[in-house]
């Protein structure tokens, strides 16, 4: 909860904010064209925000609760890996990781999929220890929860479990194996259905590139937010692999390795998609730290805390999530004048919705009107706003504010030729402001 609202909502969180404010029918229409794999998350948060509202605290609180519960599950996994002290070390290490706070304070489903991954692994371990119908049902429910929260993450998690079961069951136990397969199979149905529905919307991930050597080199930083903390976690997790921790090892290493391998062949690798491995990594690392001795375990936790602290503070700055959305109020708020209008670029390829969302979320009315818009974002099942053709409804304002997410120098370049031509013919750039994924320009009429 520390500085939960410090970081501005970034593009993906703004997508959540925009979706949950829709009516149920509008949400159904929207997910028919984009984000169908997030429909369960949007639907749950839509119902929740009817009570809690759509403030930053309200939007991020479910993720905070999910990660808090995950820490408890990590303690339980650590205990199974090396006793009570290992459980305590695992839980503390998990809580100290900057990546945990990063997604605990984000209005997206990643915290939920991490929680369900921890619960599913704990249920699988218990099922392997002693198969019962109840344990099978719990495992099935946890797998289903992970798949509903994030289909790809859920399927990567199940792949890790599929490797774990034959390695653990020696000698082979047919009944236990069948119950594990039954739970994984039934629990994976929601993820598979969402994945099939989402095939038609693959253009949404067209910004992802193939895995190369730079991807591998940057993995500790990109996956764990802090390369130093990620390196400590990975090194300890490797040292924590023992025969009794085979299930944890498979759950920890199969998802990221599989995602990397597949990412070489098709553009699918995004580090946060492999966060389902975090609970198992933390449990293995806690067991390894305690096995080295109490002083060594304390030293590891202290070192992680010291290395993590500056990253934690950075994550809670206004631009901590990579987009300094809130700065728009400080720039336009005191400078705009009656008669000003605002326009937006058109050709941002990856997060084109963010520009208007930032404007509407962080610049309260009264504000310069969005003069070109004839239909708002997410209306009638369409993600982006509709504008009048060729900026024909621009009029002749004295000043135009341009808000985008590209560098400030590129704002006019990112417009369609007709809109750019119309604006450049009558206006010149008076001033520019640039922040992380937020660019603002003030244009004045030419003399």
Image (cartoon, grey):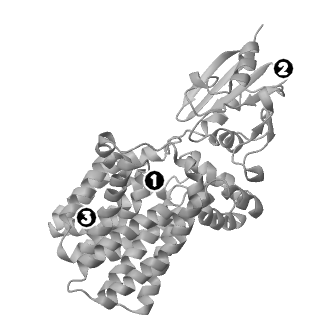
List the residue tagged with mark 1: 102
Q: Given contact means CB atoms under 8 Å apart, are the residues at marks 2 and 3 in contact? A: no
Task: Please tell me whether mark 2 sits on a helix, a strand or a loop.
Answer: loop
Is 419 left or right of 221, judged from the image as shown? Answer: right
Q: Nearer the viewer, residue 372 or 170?
A: 170
- Could one spot residue 302 in this view of the protein? no
Task: Please tell me whether mark 3 sits on a helix, a strand or a loop.
Answer: helix
Label 3 crowd bin: few (<14), some (14–19), many (20+), radius 10 Å: many
Of pointers 1 and 3, the one earlier in the residue sequence: 1
List the residue tagged with mark 3: 285
Q: Residue at x 28, y 48 (%)?
A: 228
The location of residue 32, given as percent across then percent down, is 68, 58
- Could one spot residue 368 in this view of the protein? yes
Image: 107 above or below 211: below
**Cα–Cα span, label 2 and label 3:** 64 Å
List the residue tagged with mark 2: 396
**Cα–Cα span, label 1 and label 3:** 20 Å
Of circles 1 and 2, the one toward us is: 2
């Amino acid at each position: 909860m520390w500085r939960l609202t410090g970081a501005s909502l970034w593009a993906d969180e703004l997508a959540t904010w925009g979706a949950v404010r829709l009516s149920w029918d509008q949400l159904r229409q929207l997910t028919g064209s984009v984000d169908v794999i997030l429909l369960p998350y949007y639907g749950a948060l839509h119902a929740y925000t009817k009570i809690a509202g759509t403030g930053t605290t309200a939007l991020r609180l479910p993720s905070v609760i999910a990660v808090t519960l995950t820490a408890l599950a990590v303690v339980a996994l650590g205990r199974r890996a090396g006793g009570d002290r290992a459980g305590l070390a695992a839980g503390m290490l998990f809580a100290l990781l900057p990546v945990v706070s990063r997604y605990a304070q984000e209005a997206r489903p990643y915290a939920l999929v991490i929680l369900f991954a921890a619960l599913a692994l704990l249920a699988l371990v218990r099922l392997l220890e002693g198969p019962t119908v109840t344990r099978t049902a719990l495992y099935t429910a946890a797998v289903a929860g992970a798949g509903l929260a994030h289909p790809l993450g859920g399927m990567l998690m199940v792949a890790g479990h599929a490797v774990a079961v034959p390695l653990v069951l020696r000698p082979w136990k047919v009944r236990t194996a069948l119950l594990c397969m039954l739970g994984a199979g039934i629990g994976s149905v929601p993820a598979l259905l969402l994945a099939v529905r989402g095939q038609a919307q693959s253009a949404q991930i067209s910004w992802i590139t193939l895995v190369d050597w730079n991807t591998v080199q940057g993995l500790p930083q990109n996956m764990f937010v802090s390369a130093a903390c990620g390196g400590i976690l990975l090194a300890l997790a490797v040292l924590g692999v023992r025969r009794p921790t085979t299930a944890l090892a498979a759950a920890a290493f199969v998802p990221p390795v599989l995602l990397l391998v597949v990412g070489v062949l098709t553009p699918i690798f995004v580090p946060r998609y492999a966060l389902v491995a975090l609970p198992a990594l933390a449990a293995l690392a806690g067991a390894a730290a305690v096995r080295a001795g109490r002083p060594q375990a304390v030293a590891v936790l202290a070192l992680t805390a010291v290395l993590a602290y500056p990253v934690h503070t950075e994550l809670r700055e206004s631009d901590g999530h990579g987009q300094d959305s809130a700065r728009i109020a400080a720039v336009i708020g005191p400078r705009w004048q009656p008669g000003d209008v605002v326009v937006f670029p058109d050709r941002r390829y990856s997060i084109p919705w963010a520009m208007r969302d930032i404007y509407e979320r962080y610049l309260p009315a009264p504000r310069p009107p969005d003069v070109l818009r004839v239909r708002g974002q997410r209306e009638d099942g369409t993600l982006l706003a509709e504008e009048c053709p060729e900026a024909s409804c621009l009029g002749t304002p004295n000043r135009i504010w341009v808000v985008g997410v590209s560098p400030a120098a590129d704002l006019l370049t990112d417009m369609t030729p007709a809109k750019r031509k119309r604006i450049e013919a009558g206006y010149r750039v008076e001033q520019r402001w640039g922040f992380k994924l937020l660019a603002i320009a003030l244009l004045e009429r030419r003399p």
